[in-house]
Image (spheres, rainbow, N blue to C red):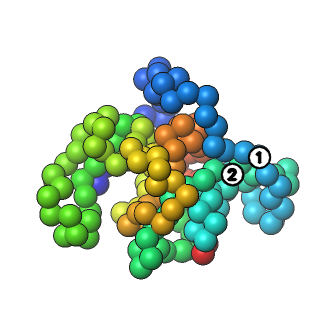
Amino acid sequence: MFGTGQYRVRLAGALAAVLCAAGAAQAREVVPFAEGIGAGTIVVRTTERRLYLVNGDGTAIRYPVAVGKPGKQWSGATQIDGKYYQPDWSPPAEVKRDNPRLPNLIRGGSPSNPMGVAAMTLRGGEYAIHGTNRPRSIGTFASYGCIRMYNQDIADLFERVSVGTQVYVMR
């Protein structure tokens, strides 16, 4: 699903250019969060369509997200198992079946690539937390189970977490 040659731990200059082009819009905010979950943990609440990065001081950074369509949602615990800058995307079998006109591969950086500027894959499946080329979908039930973020927000989260970060997806 993701191009192996696109791995980057730091986004650096190319991502900075994308963020400058996106303007100063900041969808994220720091909010109270005192639920006994360790610092650095990601919590996704699908009913709220929000992702929280726990700070450990009684607060979290809250980001708006798009989540799975009805029947495509999931919940559980997992970890980030890969971080990719400008990832290539191959539609999973279910997506390809529902949209047979999709190409087998869309290169990273293409405006038609649904992964946006970066993606973090989740262990145990074909899901990821990723950017989007459809910012109007944020705040909706739009995906096949992935967690979509504004490109500027995935870039921010990408820099704050590492491979192995714990992720809880709750309904």
| Crowd tier of the residue under label 1, counting other residues whose Cα lies within 10 Å: few below 14, some 14–19, many 20 or above | some
As displayed, is residue 165 above or below residue 27? below
Residue 9: x %, y % from top left = 48, 35
Q: Nearer the viewer, residue 39 or 24?
A: 24
The reply to whether callout 1 and callout 2 are in contact (CB within 8 Å) is yes
Residue 127: x %, y % from top left = 41, 62
Distance CA(mark 1)–CA(mark 2)? 6 Å
Residue matched to label 1? 30
Q: Residue furthest front?
A: 136
As displayed, is residue 31 above or below residue 94? above
As displayed, is residue 154 above or below residue 24? below
Residue 1: x %, y % from top left = 28, 54
Q: Residue at x 80, y 58 (%)?
A: 33
Residue matched to label 2? 62
| Residue 99 falls in image quadrant | bottom left
Q: Nearer the viewer, residue 10 or 52?
A: 52
Q: Identify residue type, mark 2.
A: Arg
Q: Is residue 43 visible?
A: yes
Q: Secondary structure at mark 1?
A: strand
Q: Is residue 120 visible?
A: no
Q: Residue furthest bottom?
A: 71
Q: Earlier in the sequence, mark 1 or mark 2?
A: 1
Residue 154: x %, y % from top left = 53, 43
**Left or right placement of residue 1 versus residue 71 in this view:** left
